[in-house]
Amino acid sequence: MAAILITGAMCSTASDLLDSHANILPCQQILRNHCHCAALRLATLHVTHPLHKGIAATYRYLAKCNFDRQKRLPSPIHKLIREFKINPDTTETIQPICHYPKWSADVDMRIAESKEKAFKEDEGVEEELRAYSDSLVIDGGVGGAAVLMEGERRIGESRFHLGTADMHTVYEGEVVGMILTVKLLEAEMKARGGNRIMDLGADNQATIRAMLAFQSKPGHYLMDKFHNDLRTLLPQENDRKLIVHWSVGHIGIPGNEQADEQAKKAERGETSAAHLLLSSLWSSSITPLSLPTSKSAIKQSFRALIKEEAKTMQKNSPCYTRFKEIDPSFPSNCFTKLADEYPH
Protein backbone atom coordinates (compact mmCIF):
# COMPACT_ATOMS: atom_id res chain seq x y z
CA MET A 1 0.00 0.00 0.00
CA ALA A 2 2.84 2.40 0.83
CA ALA A 3 4.62 1.64 -2.46
CA ILE A 4 1.40 2.23 -4.43
CA LEU A 5 0.93 5.60 -2.71
CA ILE A 6 4.55 6.55 -3.42
CA THR A 7 4.50 5.58 -7.10
CA GLY A 8 0.85 6.15 -7.99
CA ALA A 9 0.76 2.73 -9.69
CA MET A 10 -2.26 0.49 -10.16
CA CYS A 11 -3.29 -1.93 -7.42
CA SER A 12 -2.51 -4.91 -9.62
CA THR A 13 1.16 -3.94 -10.06
CA ALA A 14 3.64 -6.57 -8.80
CA SER A 15 5.07 -5.80 -5.34
CA ASP A 16 8.65 -6.48 -6.50
CA LEU A 17 8.29 -3.92 -9.27
CA LEU A 18 6.77 -1.37 -6.86
CA ASP A 19 9.67 -1.79 -4.40
CA SER A 20 12.17 -1.17 -7.21
CA HIS A 21 10.32 1.92 -8.45
CA ALA A 22 9.81 3.35 -4.94
CA ASN A 23 13.43 2.51 -3.99
CA ILE A 24 12.42 0.81 -0.74
CA LEU A 25 13.36 -2.51 0.81
CA PRO A 26 10.86 -5.38 0.92
CA CYS A 27 8.54 -5.24 3.91
CA GLN A 28 10.29 -8.19 5.64
CA GLN A 29 13.65 -6.43 5.47
CA ILE A 30 12.22 -3.17 6.80
CA LEU A 31 10.79 -5.02 9.81
CA ARG A 32 14.12 -6.81 10.40
CA ASN A 33 15.93 -3.48 10.28
CA HIS A 34 13.62 -1.95 12.91
CA CYS A 35 14.00 -5.01 15.16
CA HIS A 36 17.79 -4.87 14.80
CA CYS A 37 17.82 -1.17 15.77
CA ALA A 38 15.78 -2.02 18.88
CA ALA A 39 18.15 -4.86 19.86
CA LEU A 40 21.18 -2.62 19.31
CA ARG A 41 19.65 0.12 21.43
CA LEU A 42 19.13 -2.39 24.26
CA ALA A 43 22.71 -3.67 24.01
CA THR A 44 24.17 -0.16 24.34
CA LEU A 45 22.25 0.85 27.48
CA HIS A 46 24.24 2.19 30.42
CA VAL A 47 24.81 -0.06 33.46
CA THR A 48 22.57 2.22 35.54
CA HIS A 49 19.58 1.49 33.29
CA PRO A 50 17.03 -0.89 34.88
CA LEU A 51 17.05 -3.18 31.82
CA HIS A 52 20.83 -3.56 31.53
CA LYS A 53 21.22 -6.38 34.05
CA GLY A 54 18.41 -8.42 32.52
CA ILE A 55 19.74 -7.94 28.98
CA ALA A 56 23.25 -9.06 29.96
CA ALA A 57 21.85 -12.12 31.79
CA THR A 58 19.70 -13.02 28.77
CA TYR A 59 22.68 -12.89 26.41
CA ARG A 60 24.80 -15.07 28.71
CA TYR A 61 21.96 -17.62 29.02
CA LEU A 62 21.50 -17.85 25.24
CA ALA A 63 25.27 -17.88 24.56
CA LYS A 64 25.71 -20.93 26.84
CA CYS A 65 23.34 -22.95 24.66
CA ASN A 66 24.78 -21.50 21.44
CA PHE A 67 21.48 -19.65 20.81
CA ASP A 68 19.72 -22.96 20.04
CA ARG A 69 17.40 -23.19 23.03
CA GLN A 70 14.60 -20.82 23.87
CA LYS A 71 12.41 -20.39 26.91
CA ARG A 72 8.88 -21.71 26.81
CA LEU A 73 7.44 -18.20 27.03
CA PRO A 74 10.21 -15.94 25.69
CA SER A 75 9.98 -12.20 26.18
CA PRO A 76 10.53 -9.76 23.28
CA ILE A 77 14.05 -9.14 24.65
CA HIS A 78 14.83 -12.88 24.47
CA LYS A 79 13.56 -13.01 20.89
CA LEU A 80 15.62 -9.97 19.79
CA ILE A 81 18.87 -11.16 21.38
CA ARG A 82 18.41 -14.71 20.06
CA GLU A 83 17.84 -13.37 16.55
CA PHE A 84 20.67 -10.82 16.33
CA LYS A 85 23.20 -12.10 18.93
CA ILE A 86 24.49 -8.65 19.95
CA ASN A 87 26.75 -8.96 23.00
CA PRO A 88 26.16 -6.05 25.45
CA ASP A 89 29.50 -6.76 27.19
CA THR A 90 31.59 -6.12 24.06
CA THR A 91 29.43 -3.36 22.52
CA GLU A 92 30.05 0.28 23.37
CA THR A 93 27.85 1.99 25.95
CA ILE A 94 25.93 5.14 25.02
CA GLN A 95 26.08 7.50 27.98
CA PRO A 96 22.69 8.95 28.97
CA ILE A 97 24.25 12.34 29.83
CA CYS A 98 27.35 13.68 28.10
CA HIS A 99 28.22 16.87 30.06
CA TYR A 100 26.79 18.94 32.86
CA PRO A 101 24.92 22.11 31.72
CA LYS A 102 27.70 24.62 32.44
CA TRP A 103 30.44 22.58 30.77
CA SER A 104 32.59 24.30 28.15
CA ALA A 105 35.25 22.70 25.98
CA ASP A 106 38.93 23.64 26.21
CA VAL A 107 39.10 23.96 22.43
CA ASP A 108 38.62 26.77 19.94
CA MET A 109 36.92 25.37 16.83
CA ARG A 110 37.70 26.93 13.46
CA ILE A 111 36.07 25.64 10.26
CA ALA A 112 36.63 27.66 7.09
CA GLU A 113 33.77 28.33 4.66
CA SER A 114 35.55 26.67 1.73
CA LYS A 115 38.52 24.44 0.91
CA GLU A 116 40.39 27.39 -0.60
CA LYS A 117 40.07 29.47 2.58
CA ALA A 118 41.06 26.49 4.72
CA PHE A 119 44.17 25.96 2.60
CA LYS A 120 45.16 29.64 2.87
CA GLU A 121 44.69 29.59 6.65
CA ASP A 122 46.89 26.51 6.86
CA GLU A 123 49.58 28.13 4.71
CA GLY A 124 49.53 31.40 6.66
CA VAL A 125 49.89 29.84 10.11
CA GLU A 126 52.40 31.65 12.32
CA GLU A 127 52.89 28.99 15.00
CA GLU A 128 56.05 26.94 14.80
CA LEU A 129 54.38 23.81 16.09
CA ARG A 130 51.24 22.24 14.70
CA ALA A 131 49.76 18.78 15.18
CA TYR A 132 47.75 16.85 12.59
CA SER A 133 45.51 13.81 13.01
CA ASP A 134 43.98 11.44 10.47
CA SER A 135 42.19 8.11 10.13
CA LEU A 136 41.84 5.58 7.32
CA VAL A 137 39.86 2.44 6.52
CA ILE A 138 41.71 0.31 3.95
CA ASP A 139 41.70 -3.46 3.40
CA GLY A 140 39.26 -3.99 6.25
CA GLY A 141 41.33 -2.28 8.97
CA VAL A 142 40.81 0.97 10.89
CA GLY A 143 43.68 3.08 12.19
CA GLY A 144 44.22 6.50 13.72
CA ALA A 145 47.44 8.50 13.67
CA ALA A 146 48.92 11.85 14.66
CA VAL A 147 52.05 13.78 13.71
CA LEU A 148 53.73 16.86 15.18
CA MET A 149 55.20 19.27 12.63
CA GLU A 150 57.69 22.10 12.95
CA GLY A 151 57.25 23.94 9.69
CA GLU A 152 57.46 21.20 7.07
CA ARG A 153 59.58 18.88 9.25
CA ARG A 154 58.02 16.03 11.21
CA ILE A 155 59.34 15.87 14.77
CA GLY A 156 56.98 13.28 16.24
CA GLU A 157 54.40 10.67 15.29
CA SER A 158 52.07 8.18 16.96
CA ARG A 159 49.78 5.41 15.66
CA PHE A 160 46.95 3.25 17.00
CA HIS A 161 45.24 0.28 15.34
CA LEU A 162 41.58 0.08 16.36
CA GLY A 163 40.60 -3.19 14.70
CA THR A 164 38.53 -4.30 11.72
CA ALA A 165 36.10 -2.16 9.71
CA ASP A 166 33.11 -4.30 10.76
CA MET A 167 33.78 -3.34 14.41
CA HIS A 168 34.96 0.29 14.16
CA THR A 169 34.39 3.41 12.07
CA VAL A 170 36.47 6.23 10.58
CA TYR A 171 34.93 8.62 13.13
CA GLU A 172 36.42 6.58 15.99
CA GLY A 173 39.79 6.59 14.25
CA GLU A 174 39.66 10.38 13.88
CA VAL A 175 38.97 10.86 17.60
CA VAL A 176 41.74 8.41 18.52
CA GLY A 177 44.08 10.43 16.29
CA MET A 178 43.21 13.58 18.24
CA ILE A 179 43.86 11.76 21.53
CA LEU A 180 47.30 10.84 20.21
CA THR A 181 48.04 14.51 19.43
CA VAL A 182 47.53 15.38 23.12
CA LYS A 183 50.44 13.10 24.08
CA LEU A 184 52.67 14.56 21.36
CA LEU A 185 51.87 18.13 22.39
CA GLU A 186 52.29 17.34 26.09
CA ALA A 187 55.76 15.86 25.56
CA GLU A 188 56.85 18.79 23.37
CA MET A 189 55.55 21.44 25.79
CA LYS A 190 57.47 19.84 28.65
CA ALA A 191 60.64 19.75 26.56
CA ARG A 192 60.41 23.33 25.30
CA GLY A 193 58.47 25.01 28.10
CA GLY A 194 56.78 28.36 27.69
CA ASN A 195 53.19 29.32 27.09
CA ARG A 196 52.96 28.35 23.44
CA ILE A 197 49.87 28.41 21.25
CA MET A 198 48.85 24.86 20.39
CA ASP A 199 47.19 24.02 17.10
CA LEU A 200 45.59 20.82 15.79
CA GLY A 201 44.51 20.19 12.20
CA ALA A 202 41.87 17.55 11.42
CA ASP A 203 40.29 16.80 8.04
CA ASN A 204 36.94 15.56 9.37
CA GLN A 205 34.42 18.32 10.11
CA ALA A 206 32.00 15.97 11.92
CA THR A 207 34.70 15.09 14.45
CA ILE A 208 35.58 18.76 15.03
CA ARG A 209 31.94 19.71 15.61
CA ALA A 210 31.46 16.77 17.98
CA MET A 211 33.97 18.35 20.36
CA LEU A 212 31.36 20.88 21.43
CA ALA A 213 28.36 18.51 21.35
CA PHE A 214 26.21 17.94 24.43
CA GLN A 215 24.24 15.03 23.00
CA SER A 216 25.82 11.62 23.50
CA LYS A 217 26.32 9.71 20.24
CA PRO A 218 28.08 6.48 19.16
CA GLY A 219 31.81 6.81 19.76
CA HIS A 220 31.40 9.72 22.15
CA TYR A 221 33.15 7.84 24.95
CA LEU A 222 36.36 8.42 22.96
CA MET A 223 35.60 12.15 22.79
CA ASP A 224 35.23 12.11 26.60
CA LYS A 225 38.70 10.51 26.80
CA PHE A 226 40.04 13.31 24.59
CA HIS A 227 38.61 16.06 26.82
CA ASN A 228 39.86 14.32 29.98
CA ASP A 229 43.38 13.99 28.56
CA LEU A 230 43.28 17.58 27.35
CA ARG A 231 42.75 18.84 30.91
CA THR A 232 46.20 17.50 31.86
CA LEU A 233 47.69 19.55 29.02
CA LEU A 234 45.73 22.73 29.83
CA PRO A 235 45.73 23.41 33.60
CA GLN A 236 42.76 25.28 35.05
CA GLU A 237 44.88 28.25 36.12
CA ASN A 238 46.03 28.63 32.52
CA ASP A 239 43.76 30.41 30.02
CA ARG A 240 45.19 28.55 27.02
CA LYS A 241 42.98 26.62 24.66
CA LEU A 242 43.75 24.12 21.95
CA ILE A 243 42.94 25.58 18.53
CA VAL A 244 41.32 22.90 16.36
CA HIS A 245 40.90 23.82 12.71
CA TRP A 246 39.67 22.09 9.58
CA SER A 247 42.65 20.98 7.52
CA VAL A 248 41.54 19.79 4.07
CA GLY A 249 43.06 16.45 3.10
CA HIS A 250 44.85 15.48 -0.12
CA ILE A 251 45.58 19.02 -1.35
CA GLY A 252 49.28 19.18 -0.55
CA ILE A 253 49.42 20.25 3.11
CA PRO A 254 52.67 18.64 4.40
CA GLY A 255 51.36 17.85 7.90
CA ASN A 256 48.16 16.31 6.59
CA GLU A 257 50.07 14.18 4.10
CA GLN A 258 52.39 12.96 6.88
CA ALA A 259 49.40 12.08 9.08
CA ASP A 260 47.86 10.19 6.16
CA GLU A 261 51.03 8.07 5.78
CA GLN A 262 51.04 7.23 9.47
CA ALA A 263 47.33 6.35 9.36
CA LYS A 264 48.04 3.86 6.56
CA LYS A 265 50.56 2.12 8.82
CA ALA A 266 48.07 2.12 11.69
CA GLU A 267 45.25 0.53 9.69
CA ARG A 268 47.64 -2.29 8.69
CA GLY A 269 48.04 -3.14 12.38
CA GLU A 270 50.95 -0.98 13.60
CA THR A 271 50.51 0.61 17.04
CA SER A 272 53.06 2.82 18.78
CA ALA A 273 54.80 1.69 21.97
CA ALA A 274 52.94 2.13 25.26
CA HIS A 275 55.12 5.04 26.42
CA LEU A 276 54.02 7.00 23.32
CA LEU A 277 50.32 6.54 24.20
CA LEU A 278 48.26 8.16 26.90
CA SER A 279 46.97 5.93 29.70
CA SER A 280 43.46 6.18 28.21
CA LEU A 281 44.61 4.05 25.25
CA TRP A 282 46.45 1.22 26.99
CA SER A 283 45.31 -1.41 29.47
CA SER A 284 46.70 -2.36 32.89
CA SER A 285 48.89 -5.03 31.25
CA ILE A 286 50.71 -2.28 29.29
CA THR A 287 49.19 -3.39 25.99
CA PRO A 288 47.06 -1.36 23.56
CA LEU A 289 43.48 -1.02 24.77
CA SER A 290 40.87 -3.19 23.04
CA LEU A 291 38.06 -0.79 22.18
CA PRO A 292 34.42 -1.96 22.35
CA THR A 293 32.53 -2.65 19.13
CA SER A 294 31.03 0.48 17.62
CA LYS A 295 27.26 0.80 17.45
CA SER A 296 27.54 2.59 14.10
CA ALA A 297 29.75 -0.19 12.65
CA ILE A 298 27.24 -2.88 13.70
CA LYS A 299 24.41 -0.90 12.13
CA GLN A 300 26.33 -0.38 8.87
CA SER A 301 27.20 -4.07 8.61
CA PHE A 302 23.59 -5.10 9.17
CA ARG A 303 22.30 -2.64 6.57
CA ALA A 304 24.67 -4.14 4.02
CA LEU A 305 23.42 -7.61 5.01
CA ILE A 306 19.72 -6.83 4.55
CA LYS A 307 20.43 -5.21 1.18
CA GLU A 308 22.01 -8.49 0.06
CA GLU A 309 19.01 -10.37 1.47
CA ALA A 310 16.69 -8.09 -0.50
CA LYS A 311 18.60 -8.81 -3.72
CA THR A 312 18.32 -12.56 -3.06
CA MET A 313 14.56 -12.20 -2.54
CA GLN A 314 14.25 -10.28 -5.80
CA LYS A 315 16.20 -12.97 -7.68
CA ASN A 316 13.84 -15.64 -6.30
CA SER A 317 10.79 -13.64 -7.41
CA PRO A 318 8.52 -15.05 -10.16
CA CYS A 319 8.90 -11.69 -11.94
CA TYR A 320 12.72 -11.88 -11.99
CA THR A 321 12.93 -13.29 -15.54
CA ARG A 322 10.73 -10.51 -16.91
CA PHE A 323 12.76 -7.88 -15.06
CA LYS A 324 16.00 -9.19 -16.57
CA GLU A 325 14.56 -8.82 -20.08
CA ILE A 326 14.04 -5.09 -19.46
CA ASP A 327 17.11 -4.41 -17.27
CA PRO A 328 19.97 -6.99 -17.54
CA SER A 329 21.67 -5.48 -14.45
CA PHE A 330 18.61 -6.06 -12.21
CA PRO A 331 18.74 -5.96 -9.18
CA SER A 332 20.93 -2.86 -9.11
CA ASN A 333 20.82 0.87 -8.43
CA CYS A 334 20.84 1.75 -12.14
CA PHE A 335 17.06 2.13 -12.34
CA THR A 336 16.97 4.41 -9.28
CA LYS A 337 19.67 6.67 -10.73
CA LEU A 338 17.83 6.89 -14.05
CA ALA A 339 14.46 7.51 -12.42
CA ASP A 340 15.84 10.35 -10.30
CA GLU A 341 16.44 12.36 -13.49
CA TYR A 342 12.72 12.47 -14.34
CA PRO A 343 9.88 14.37 -12.62
CA HIS A 344 7.15 12.41 -10.84
Image: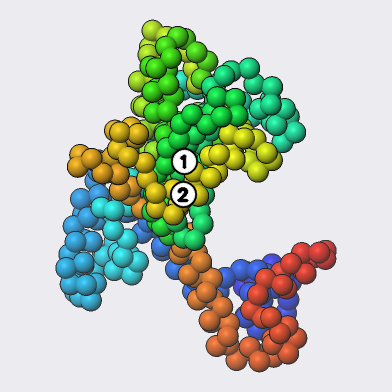
- Which quadrant of the figure has residue 108? top right
Q: Position of residue 92 (x, y in %)?
A: 34, 48
Q: How many marks?
A: 2
- Which quadrant of the figure has residue 181? top left
Q: CA distance from mark 2 to mark 1?
A: 9 Å
Q: Position of residue 283 (x, y in %)?
A: 24, 41
Element under disc 2 = helix
Judge whether 47 appears above or below 183 on screen.
below
Is 80 left or right of 284, judged from the image as shown? right
Residue 265, disc: 2
Q: Is residue 104 visible?
A: no
> Mark 2 near mark 1, Cβ–Cβ under 8 Å?
yes
- In this rendered view, identify the residue nearer to me: 168 or 210: 168
Image point 35% across, 34% down: which residue? 276
Q: Position of residue 241 (x, y in %)?
A: 49, 17
Q: Amino acid at mark 2?
A: Lys
